[in-house]
């Protein structure tokens, strides 16, 4: 691969899952991929549990921020090659028009930020979400992207979202 593929992870609040996915992919995939994250209704801050989980996995957290998906639909924004929705709400919402017709897929992951219970329950929820995202990203990165056409890749991506 001689080019960099841009990937956008979407959730409603862009505070936990999409932030963790952005950090995981950027850590594991340079220079072939660059990940971004956004939300339809961004909370405006990253959930402390997401930061704690990323730091416990020794991933960088500098520069991570909760932002609107509108940033990526504006002129001059990076052209996305892939868009992954990580929550059912974002998957059902009407998304902005993305230039270039990126490949899209839904990877449903429960929101760890919504877990009620003890502090240990909350830590476990963030860990579970992190490992679910990490597995799917590792599977995605193992695909022979240079040799696959968009439609064939679409089927592969949809399959990863069910694992």
Image: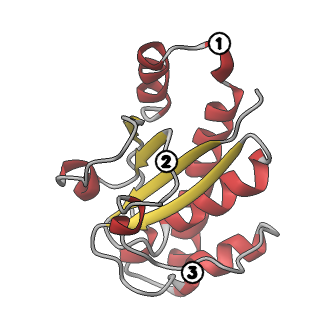
State the SS at label 3: helix
Closer to the eye: label 2 or 3: 2
Q: Position of residue 99 (x, y in %)?
A: 37, 44
Q: Residue at x 42, y 23 (%)?
A: 154
- Relative vertical location of residue 126 with respect to residue 86 in this rendering, above or below: below
Where does residue 68 sit, x and y in percent of width and height? Answer: 36, 72
Determine contact: label 3, label 1, CB under 8 Å: no
Residue under pointer 3:
49
Q: Residues within 10 Å of mark 3 (few under 14, many from 20)?
A: many
- Give the x, y percent position of residue 28: 77, 49
Q: Horizontally, is 82 left or right of 39 in the view? A: right
Mark 1 neighbour density, 10 Å: few (under 14) some (14–19) many (20 or more):
few
Work out whether residue 142 or residue 83 is closer to the camera in this orientation and state it: 83
Q: Earlier in the sequence, mark 2 or mark 3?
A: 3
Q: Is residue 108 above or below residue 138?
A: below
Residue found at x 49% / y 52%:
8
Residue located beneath label 1 in the image: 147
**Chain-order first, disc 1 or disc 2:** 2
The residue tagged 2 is 79
Identify the secondary structure beneath mark 1.
Answer: helix
């Amino acid at each position: 691969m001689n080019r960099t593929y841009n990937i956008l992870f979407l959730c409603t609040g862009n505070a936990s899952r999409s932030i963790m996915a952005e950090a995981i992919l950027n850590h594991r995939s340079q220079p072939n991929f660059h990940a971004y994250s956004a939300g339809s209704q961004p909370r405006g801050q990253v959930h402390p549990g997401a930061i704690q989980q990323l730091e416990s996995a020794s991933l960088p957290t500098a520069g991570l921020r909760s932002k609107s998906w509108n940033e990526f639909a504006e002129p001059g924004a990076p052209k996305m090659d892939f868009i992954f929705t990580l929550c059912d709400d974002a998957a059902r919402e009407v998304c902005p028009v993305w230039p270039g017709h990126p490949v899209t897929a839904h990877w449903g992951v429960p929101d760890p930020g919504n877990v009620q219970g003890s502090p240990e329950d909350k830590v476990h929820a963030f860990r579970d979400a992190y490992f679910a995202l990490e597995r799917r990203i590792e599977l995605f990165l193992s695909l022979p992207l240079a040799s696959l056409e968009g439609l064939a890749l679409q089927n592969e991506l949809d399959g990863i979202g069910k694992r």
